[in-house]
Amino acid sequence: MPGVLPEGEPVPADGSLPATATRAVGARGFGVYVHVPFCASRCGYCDFNTYTADELGGGASREGYADTVLAELALAARVLGDAPPPRVDTVFVGGGTPTLLPADDLARILDGVDRTWGLAADAEVTTEANPESVTPESLKTLRAAGYTRISLGMQSAAPGVLAILDRRHRAGRATEAAREARDAGFDHVNLDLIYGTPGESADDFAASLAQVVAAGVDHVSAYALIVEDGTRLAARMRRGELPYPSDDVAADRYLAAEAALDAAGFSWYEVSNWARTPAGRCRHNLLYWNGGDWWGLGPGAHSHVGGVRWWNVKHPAAYAKRLAAGESPGLAREVLTPDEAHTEDVMLRLRLASGLPLAVLDDAGRAGARRALADGLLDPAGYAAGRAVLTLRGRLLADAVVRDLLP
Ligand SMILES: C[S@@+](CC[C@H](N)C(=O)[O-])C[C@H]1O[C@@H](n2cnc3c(N)ncnc32)[C@H](O)[C@@H]1O
Ligand code: SF4
């Protein structure tokens, strides 16, 4: 979710979309994202749109949240009424901490999506979860309700690193929760790691990777720590209490992740994502990266349908107020120009192991691809097959390669 949004144009009160956008909804797949904007406490590094009980104020509550989301879903059903998606391929409930809601509320939201547009028989249905906010019982309820995949924020195996990140769970709880999820019948379990936290040693990260591998999960996401403006972590670094992360350390950690995960039978399929098998890849994220359509429900959620992108008001109280008045919670929208759509396509698909077809590049972009190939940043076999596929060194320098391929 970008921190700074373009201003965009207003979303009509009834949420209606231009006819050009709704001609072929779901032609490249259709997903539903549900944002759950609640956390028990805020981690010092996180700038996601999420609120603790104290920050929530009046006008919104966890108790009423599932019904508010279902009200937006009813509005979405009206907007896409004449041209609904053929089916829902993926659902992703993210946050915040979705598992702060009772499992029955998460079940009700999923049931609402199914009743509205119909879940595909093989739909992927993910929820994010904080390790301390699930139990064997709640995991069984989620599995029985139709959730097929769970994504747990582990971040690190090292107690000192978890403390710097302000995580609430003890070391070891994330992998324990992953095992509980597998026992509850989840075939697809992800663990998120953050690397490059000040105070994290190479041995700490090696231990995190070893624990992830031993937990038997089929998916790992590993992100370099981003110091977001306005966070407590950024303030501590500005005051000199903690050092800023180093690019060289982040590159070393990335290489360590690739080596350990590859040795354990995982393959990268996006720069920050590894899966044990093709079936373990996150289809919802692949839908985003491949330019599919999705409706994002919840405060601050983004949607994309047929080249129109919009985003909702951020505060849960403002979101609930709009829906109570029968109005769209959409704050603003933009219709992507062909140039913007091209830039986005290059940025997203170049990060995939399947690569970007060279045919989508203009002359300048193809010249850039030839330079990146000569510099060892693109894979020769992929290039010979007509695709720009990053090498391992290219993955470390992905943003620079993107710049080379764009006008
Ligand atoms: C927004 S969280 C939601 C999941 C859940 N609340 C949790 O924290 O476990 C999704 C993931 O984003 C990653 N993340 C959030 N802020 C980050 C930051 N500043 N730098 C790197 N990764 C970050 C973390 O790995 C986290 O697990
Ligand atoms: S629990 Fe997750 S969403 Fe909540 S503040 Fe921490 S990282 Fe952000």
Image (cartoon, rainbow, N blue to C red):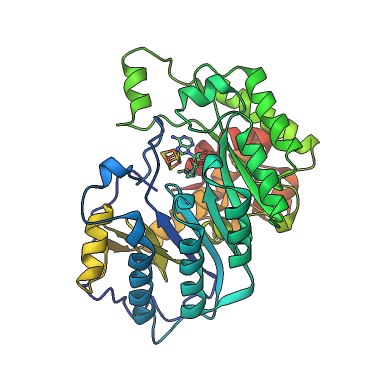
Quick one: which residue is furthest to the front in this view? 137
Residue in the foreground of this view, choosing between 387 and 258: 258
Q: Where residue 245 sits: x, y (%)? A: 47, 21
Q: Is residue 351 visible to us here?
A: no
Residue 54 visible in rendering: yes
Relative height, residue 392 to residue 80 (above, below): above
Kindly give the residue lying farthest to the top in the view shown.
240
Looking at the image, which residue sits at the far bottom?
A: 82
Residue at the spot x=44%, y=54% of the render?
101
Q: In front: 386, or 327?
A: 327
Image location (x, y in percent) of residue 5: 29, 49
Residue drawn 38% across and 25% down?
A: 233
Question: How many discs appear?
Answer: 0
Q: Is residue 201 above or below residue 19?
A: above
| Picture quadrant of ligand 2 | top left
Q: Quadrant of residue 241?
A: top left
Relative to the observer, which residue lies in front, 294 or 339? 294
Q: Is residue 98 left or right of residue 37?
A: right
The picture places residue 168, in percent across and down from the top left corner, at 48, 32
Task: Please name the residue shown 23% across and 69% down the image.
Answer: 324
Query: Relative to 352, is 233 above or below?
Result: above
Establish if 341 lies above or below 365: below
